Image (spheres, helix red, strand yellow):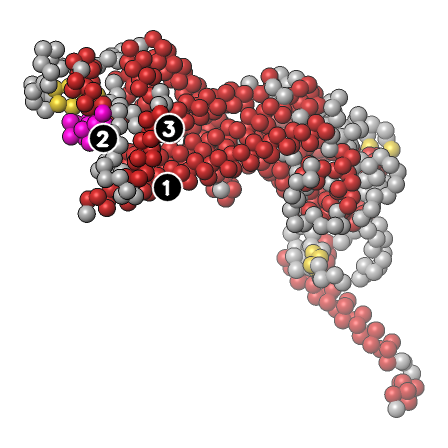
Amino acid sequence: MQDDTVTSGSADTKVPHGKISFVRLNRSEKIQHLIFMLCFFVLVITGFMLSLLPGSLVEKLGRFGNAVFFYRSLLHRAAGTVMILTSLYHLCYLAFKPGGHRWLVDMLPRFKDATDLIHNLLYFVNIRQTPPEFDRFSYMHKLEYWALVAGTTLMSLTGLMLWLEWRWSKFLLDIGALVHGMEAVLACLAIMVWHMYEIHLKPHRSPLDNVWVTGRIDEEEMKKEYPLHYKKIMADENLQAIYMVRENP
Amino acid sequence: MMHQNQKNSGIPQSVLLRMAKAMLFWLGVAVVGLVGTAHAQDDVRVDTQNCLLCHRYPGMGRFDDKGVKRIFYINDLKFANSVHGKLRCTNCHVGLDRIPHTDIKKVDCTTKCHLKEPSTEREFSHENMVQKYEASVHGSNGTNKAKPFPEDLPTCKYCHKNQIRGPVGGWGGVSEAVANETLSRCIGCHTKDQWAQNYYLHFTHRMRRIRSPEEIVALCTSCHEDHAKMSRHGLDTIETFKDTFHWHLVEFKVKNAPDCITCHVPVGFTTHDIRPKKDPNSSINEMNRVRTCSNQGGIQACHPKATEDFARGRVHAYGAKARLATGEHVNAFMDNGDSLLMERAQKEVSEQERWHFKILLYIRLFYKMLIPLVIGFMLFHQSLDFIAHFRKRH
């Protein structure tokens, strides 16, 4: 798997000529994101079918309800399994791949994230005139990523508990079912409010940010959104080899 | 003057009035009979007492003293195909010697109906079922004392509707073909077609479930979701069943979905003899839980690997009793008159159950606070971002 990219940055020049773009997600990360996203959609649809589908609509399914329920259960378990396997792969990726190491280090929470949050809020209300300078991952990315890690862990554990129901006491299963349901609501709303805004509603990215497909952003956006990371790349040839792509040599 | 007239004619006016009413009634019967004969069907099955002379008309009925619409129409074809199709009307409706029926008595299902029960060669009666039922939770609950509020308890007719018999698996399609083939084998020896048909339907009727799981839940919840009725008897309502995974299977009409009787009357138990859970003869008694959850011997092994730990817990979510026992807020319907519910809650909800209830309550509470906080912050943050973006642009 190509994890370290993709670089055509010349080692003997500090700044490559021509149009350049920057790698935000490498191929492995894009595939992980894609699988995770598809699983998430399947899990949300097949999971909330149980509690959110109105009784009148279930009634309309009539004799097809049996088949719908069967495939719902099958798909939910299949998507859950794939999501767990993808998460386990992600752990291996973090542990054993250079791209994973960099991801983990860059994603670790720092004190600057707290100050960035306050700074950004002040910028939003016009008290500060400039936004904070973000590194590779802003506090927004870190919040979402670590919430995803916690949420996936809880959902996987409780989902497996419910799947292997006979191994547990009914009380533990009740806790599992409750946490699974509540965490699902939290995850769904968080994705809808936080992530959907980032990729769909944020004015300069609407209607859809395509970084999840291309894995890259152009220099202008890089300078604007992640100025600290941009400066680091420009000052370090090794980082240029990893993150910089010259598109029109 | 009036007295003088009566004396003159020799017949009192009240007698004349009664005679006129009787003539009108019989005239009505005759007209109805004549019109009816003109449209009569040839295949009236078991009406040896000619009850259908009147009762075949769909419009036949009245409103009783309580204003309830009573329909006295009998569809003879449907009745002939029903579980009581071989009986005469007067086997169950004792009395009825007069027309109009002023001497009618309430149907008593323990009445011997003059059919011979083949295993004992005695006259058939539902008495044994009624006895079991009397001892069950729906009767005296094994105490031999009448329960308070007897009007709340279901009668035979509340659940039994004189169902129409049918071949295995329902009506029509493949099941009809199965019926035809099976019957053709029976008729080889048992030459009376109608007898073989009745015998076949008697068995196949017992081999299928008459009500769907959804209908069973609807039937049981018609009483068990009635807060006032249940609290009078010191019982929790069971709407919490609809929070369970079992209900979702019922809702989606999954085959053999677990309804009320799946757990409360599994294989080896009878619907008429549902016992309280502390009774060792109850399917939900702790001693029998593993067997009930695994449904050993049933059509479908529900939780074949069920352990004691798994089977010991509650299936319905905690209801009003747990809330009362732990001092949590209870819905408005719980007024001061529900002292019985409170008393039973204190007695029946164990320490462990209270502890479990509280843990689940606090987890739910934690999420109920966490979700609005997190999502509220996200909305706040993203809204500011959105507004700031446009402000900076202009």
Q: Nearer the viewer, residue A211 or A59?
A: A211
Q: Visible in this render: residue B143?
A: yes
Residues marked 1 and 3, same chain: no
Question: Viewed as shown, does residue B163 lie left or right of A40?
Answer: right
Q: Visible in this render: residue A197?
A: no
Q: Residue at x 41, y 22 (%)?
A: A149
> How far apart, in angstroms, are the residues tagged by discs 1 and 3?
15 Å
As displayed, is residue A71 above or below residue B62?
above
Mark 2 = which residue? A225
| Secondary structure category for the residue under label 1 | helix
Badge 3: chain ID: A
Question: Viewed as shown, does residue B290 lie left or right of A27?
Answer: right
In which quadrant is the N terminus of chain B drawn? bottom right
Q: Residue at x 56, y 34 (%)?
A: B364
In the rendering, which numbered label is found on residue A143? 3
The amino acid at mark 2 is: Glu
Residue B288, image quadrant? top right
Q: Nearer the viewer, residue B92 or B50?
A: B92
Mark 1 = which residue? B380
